[in-house]
Image (cartoon, grey):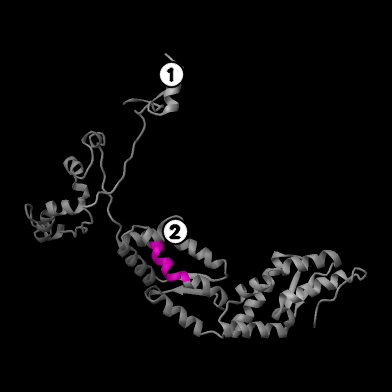
């Protein structure tokens, strides 16, 4: 229970304040009802403690009933020791570099144990705000129902334990497993994706199999339809549709170049929203058909549309659609 000044007398501003106060009472805070928590890691301390106490644990493991009554019915399997830090004494902390004056003011000491695979599995499946729920929501945004088999979760837990970074290892393993799926699956015609043990072991091989199983031209056509629908939602009431010729051209081009349809269309049609919005405001036309000419030379075609607009103020509607 100590009263601590709220000012640092070594700080120039605090010193000036103290001089101005004269004999005024300094502001303090009592530490009686304040809980101070210190945490840290001590490199090499666990290994040193293991050398000191490991023999004791080994004898207990070899002779579990040493020093007590032998009773098979009462024999229980003891959990494997993960750390010896709970055996650290004040002397051990001082030898590890702590000041005696400081460690003497920390009377209660707790050692944290490393998380094992079963702990990490419980965190994934039972914790609030689990990363699994977050991933399920991410894939749901692309219209994909993400599921995990029990074997896959066990494999993730074991690999996470091997990371030796606690619960953060779960995120690392899942990110390494699903990173490429996040980019590729939205452009594939899959509405459900079940992660099994083989997916965790060889994610690239599993993704390659999924890609090979679909018709790439059909995938690109579906992506083009989705792009047009998304465009309409974002720029309502302006809507676009692609002519059959434009659809075939873009689908074949993206398959040949191994491009993602949505990314490619977003790039080449980046000036399209402003162009169509201006035409809509001037004429009221809200439906536009993207022709093959527009798909091949979007910038030139948009410039031509605006030129036609400038020359056609006397008309009530510009026909920029091709059947």
Within the magenta stretch, is there residue 173?
yes
Number of numbered discs visible in the structure rendering: 2
Instruction: Say left or right for 188 vs 309.
Output: left
- Give me the disc on residue 19: 1
Residue at 51%, 85% (x, y): give it: 213
Label 1–label 2 contact, CB within 8 A: no
The quadrant holding residue 116 is bottom left
Q: Nearer the viewer, residue 19 or 79?
A: 19
Q: In which quadrant is the C terminus drawn? A: bottom right
What's the magenta region?
Answer: 170-179
Secondary structure under the numbered disc 2 in the rendered image? loop
Q: Nearer the viewer, residue 11 or 166?
A: 11
Q: Nearer the viewer, residue 186 or 191?
A: 186
- Residue 104 vertical position relative to residue 188 in the rendered view, above or below: above
Within the magenta stretch, is there residue 39?
no
Q: Main secondary structure of the magenta part?
A: helix
Instruction: Say left or right for 318 vs 11.
Output: right
- Residue 67 vertical position relative to residue 254 in the rendered view, above or below: above
- Residue 286 vertical position relative to residue 2 in the rendered view, above or below: below
Q: Nearer the viewer, mark 1 or mark 2?
A: 1
Q: Residue furthest left?
A: 67
Q: Nearer the viewer, residue 235 or 140?
A: 235
Residue at 35%, 60% (x, y): give it: 120
Answer few, some or many: residues within 10 Å of disc 1's Cα (few below 14, many 20 plus, some between 14 and 19).
Answer: few
The quadrant holding residue 26 is top left
Q: Position of residue 115 (x, y in %)?
A: 30, 57
* Mark found first going from the N terminus, 1 or 2: 1
Instruction: Say left or right for 203 vs 227.
Output: left
Q: Position of residue 318 (x, y in %)?
A: 86, 73
- Give me the disc on residue 130: 2
How far, Cα to Cα, is label 1 from label 2?
55 Å
Secondary structure under the numbered disc 1 in the rendered image? helix
């Amino acid at each position: 229970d100590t009263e601590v000044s709220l000012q640092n007398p070594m700080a120039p501003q605090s010193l000036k304040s103290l001089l101005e106060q004269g004999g005024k009472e300094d502001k303090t805070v009592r530490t009686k009802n304040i809980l101070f928590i210190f945490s840290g890691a001590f490199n090499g301390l666990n290994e040193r403690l293991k050398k000191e106490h490991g023999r004791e644990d080994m004898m207990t493991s070899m002779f579990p009933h040493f020093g007590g009554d032998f009773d098979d019915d009462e024999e229980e399997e003891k959990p494997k020791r993960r750390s010896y830090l709970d055996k650290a004494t004040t002397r051990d902390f001082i030898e590890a570099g702590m000041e005696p004056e400081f460690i003497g003011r920390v009377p209660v000491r707790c050692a944290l144990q490393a998380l094992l695979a079963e702990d990490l599995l419980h965190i994934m499946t039972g914790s609030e705000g689990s990363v699994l729920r977050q991933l399920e929501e991410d894939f749901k945004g692309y219209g994909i129902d993400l599921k995990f088999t029990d074997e896959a979760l066990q494999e993730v837990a074991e690999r996470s334990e091997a990371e030796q970074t606690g619960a953060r290892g779960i995120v690392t393993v899942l990110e390494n497993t699903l990173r490429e799926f996040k980019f590729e699956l939205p452009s594939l015609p899959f509405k459900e994706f079940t992660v099994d043990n083989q997916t965790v072991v060889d994610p690239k091989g599993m993704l390659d199999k999924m890609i090979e199983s679909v018709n790439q031209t059909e995938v690109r056509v579906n992506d083009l339809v989705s792009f047009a629908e998304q465009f309409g939602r974002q720029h309502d009431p302006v809507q676009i549709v692609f002519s059959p010729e434009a659809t075939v051209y873009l689908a074949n081009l993206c398959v040949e170049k191994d491009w993602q349809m949505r990314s490619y269309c977003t790039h080449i049609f980046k000036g399209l929203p402003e162009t169509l919005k201006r035409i809509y405001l001037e004429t009221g036309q809200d439906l536009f058909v993207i022709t093959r000419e527009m798909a091949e030379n979007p910038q030139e075609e948009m410039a031509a549309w605006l030129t036609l607009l400038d020359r056609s103020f006397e008309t009530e509607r510009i026909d920029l659609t091709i059947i």
